[in-house]
Amino acid sequence: MSCVAAAFPDPLTPEAIIVDAARCWRETVDRHRPILPTLFARLEVRDAGFLAPAIAALLSILEAWSGRRFRAGDESAAVLTNDEQVLLGLLETAAPPAAIHASRPGLTGALRVALRSTRIMIQRVLGLDLGERRTGIGDGPFLLGRATDEIELSPKMHRLEPGPDPVDWEAAVVNQAWSKKPDDQS
């Protein structure tokens, strides 16, 4: 776990989680470690593991688009780097700024999609948007940003009722095994 809490009064805000993930991503890439499993494990400590692919893709596209390495702060740094501040600003607007020179402008569309996708994932997984604070922590479990008691089945879904299985799966497997058995050559 990093010390991003020093930079943010509440370590469970989306901003704190994003900066912590960016720092973990940078360290993981630099050490040539498996990115997604490492980032997932780091985020899952805060029940945000599903953000790992979105954040990893966003940071990779951001580096390719800008043509330079993303500079993340040290785990113990209490101050955000310029790149971390820019990342939070990009996520806030969900659009690449015109003022930053793009090394590969052909990736602007991909960066825009990555920013919007990451922002949507943050809202779904954390149940919060950038700048929002959670109230009533501990009110119950959350599933993709919603309290489990708020989740309803859509009209197209129905609860499974126990009943007779119309297919005898055991017999089907045995019959399949017998049908593949070579004939006796006696």
Image: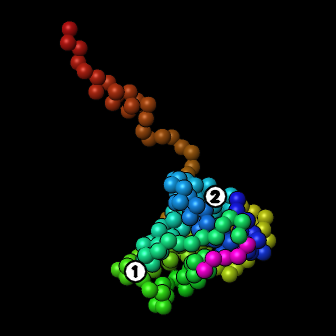
Name the mark on residue 61: none
Q: Main secondary structure of the magenta part?
A: loop
Is the N terminus in the top left, top right, bottom left or bottom right quadrant? bottom right
In the rendering, at what x and y percent does residue 59 appear? 51, 70
Residue numbers of the magenta segment: 78-82
Task: Name the residue that disc number 2 marks.
Answer: 42
Position of 7 relative to 163 (above/below): below
In the rendering, at what x and y percent does residue 56 appear? 51, 65
User: What is the residue that sits farthest to the left in this orientation?
Assistant: 185
Name the quadrant containing residue 82. Answer: bottom right
Q: How would you rate the neighbour count of disc 1 (Cα within 10 Å): few for under 14, some for 14-19, many for 20 or more?
A: some
Position of 82 relative to 148 (above/below): below
In the rendering, at what x and y percent does residue 177 appear? 34, 27
As shown in the figure, which amino acid type bears the numbered disc 1? Ser
The answer for how far apart the CA atoms under marks 2 and 1 are is: 31 Å
Look at 79% across and 71% down and name the residue there.
Answer: 136
Identify the mark nearer the N-term, 2 or 1. Answer: 2
Q: Is residue 81 magenta?
A: yes
**In terms of depth relative to the viewer, which is nearer, 6 or 18?**
6
As shown in the figure, which amino acid type bears the numbered disc 2? Arg
Q: Is residue 152 visible?
A: no
In the rendering, at what x and y percent does residue 154 appear? 54, 67
Name the mark on residue 103: 1
Is the C terminus in the top left, top right, bottom left or bottom right quadrant? top left
Q: Identify the element where label 2 is drawn.
A: helix
Look at 63% across and 61% down and name the residue there.
Answer: 43
Q: Identify the element where label 1 is drawn.
A: loop
Q: Is residue 7 visible?
A: yes
Position of 95 relative to 80 (above/below): below
Name the quadrant containing residue 24. Answer: bottom right
